[in-house]
Amino acid sequence: MKRPTRYIIVTISVILLLSLRSCELLVDKNDDCDKTKFEQTEEPVFSLIMDADQTITVDGGGKYDTKDATKAVVSGSITKIYCSGSEGGRFEFNTTLFPSASDINFLNKAKVGNAYQIKFANQNDYVMVVFREKYYFSDGKIFESAEISQRIYFKEIFTDTSLSDFPKFAWLNDIKIGFHEVTS
């Protein structure tokens, strides 16, 4: 008697599963991506730019102006993230600057990493930039920032014709980050 009941339940379950469309059972992850897709894929070549002129406040109230640093190292990575959440290419960078030997205009728009050409097919595609800054001063002090993570969407890539080689850029937001002293 148990076999026919089990058979009936399995048969009804199979019929129900076959009669329902799959989209009714599962939410399509790409629904939002389809709604925010660009008519034409954008593929800008752009640089990452930061303002390397800031003040570091250290424990005890001391202040160091980064434009006085003898050397600055900005290291990190840039990773393409598609609307669906999947990762694309990843590039690492390690840029050395010499603030005390540089013009203030250079420091206000210091390029970090290389020029990147990224495809944006959707307004929710972005690049994830993760980086740290380290500043070396003539008194032997070295200060390193906390790790900074920033999403950059296509709409956040700007054009500045005064930038001669690659006029498109995205600002790295490193304002109000914490620094700590390190030994190397």
Image (cartoon, rainbow, N blue to C red):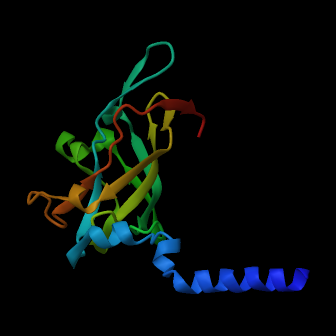
The residue nearer to you, when weighing 139 against 55, is 55
**Looking at the picture, does residue 67 appear above or below residue 173?**
above
Residue 68 picture quarter: top left
Whether residue 140 is visible here, answered yes or no, is no
Give percent across and percent down for residue 47: 27, 61
In the picture provided, is 18 more to the left or to the right than 136?
right
- Point out the image quarter for the C terminus: top right
The residue nearer to you, when weighing 50 against 36, is 36
In the picture provided, is 109 more to the left or to the right than 8?
left
Q: Residue at x 43, y 16 (%)?
A: 62
Whether residue 70 is visible here, answered yes or no, is yes
- Point out the image quarter for the N terminus: bottom right
**Looking at the picture, does residue 56 appear above or below residue 62?**
below
Residue 124 picture quarter: bottom left
The residue nearer to you, when weighing 139 against 13, is 13
Give percent across and percent down for residue 19: 53, 85
Give percent across and percent down for residue 40: 19, 79
Direction left: furthest residue:
161
The residue nearer to you, when weighing 65 against 19, is 19
Q: Residue at x 39, y 20 (%)?
A: 63
Give percent across and percent down for residue 161: 8, 60
